[in-house]
Image (cartoon, helix red, strand yellow):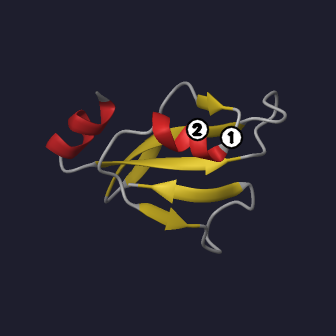
């Protein structure tokens, strides 16, 4: 739902995947951020799964995986957009 809304308004939805979210020990989590050329805002809630492979199956279809870059916090292991 958020993916279609973001794409329709010259914005994009990016998912950040982490294995180090407080309160989710032993879990992999992802959170969405809707962004445009002026910045972005984190969406409420998290996707949570016991492994990164299972978490990937929860993400919207058609996304492209990006690896961690030096601009991202160390706890982010990959992003999807």
Q: Are marks 2 and 1 in contact (CB under 8 Å)?
A: yes
Residue bearing the label numbered 2: 54
Residue 26 in which image quadrant:
top right
Residue at horizontal 19 percent and vertical 50 percent from the top: 10
Residue at horizontal 32 percent and vertical 43 percent from the top: 61
Residue 46 in which image quadrant:
top right
Q: Is residue 67 above or below residue 17?
A: below
Q: Position of residue 50 (x, y in %)?
A: 71, 33
Tell me, yes or no, if residue 17 can be seen here: yes
**19 with respect to 80 (left or right):** right
Residue at horizontal 55 percent and vertical 49 percent from the top: 16
Image quarter (top left, top right, bottom left or bottom right) of the N terminus: top left
Residue bearing the label numbered 1: 51
**19 with respect to 37 (left or right):** right
Disc 2/disc 1 C-alpha distance (Å): 5 Å
Are there few (<14), some (14-19), or many (20+) residues within 10 Å of tag 2? few
Tell me, yes or no, if residue 42 can be seen here: no
Dot 1: element:
loop
Dot 2: element:
helix
Q: Position of residue 57 (x, y in %)?
A: 48, 39
Image quarter (top left, top right, bottom left or bottom right) of the C terminus: bottom left
């Amino acid at each position: 739902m958020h993916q279609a809304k973001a794409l329709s308004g010259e914005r994009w939805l990016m998912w950040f995947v982490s294995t180090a979210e407080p309160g989710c020990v032993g879990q992999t989590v992802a959170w969405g951020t809707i962004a445009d050329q002026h910045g972005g805002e984190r969406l409420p809630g998290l996707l949570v799964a016991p492994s990164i492979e299972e978490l990937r199956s929860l993400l919207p279809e058609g996304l492209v995986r990006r690896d961690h870059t030096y601009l991202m916090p160390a706890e982010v292991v990959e992003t999807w957009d």
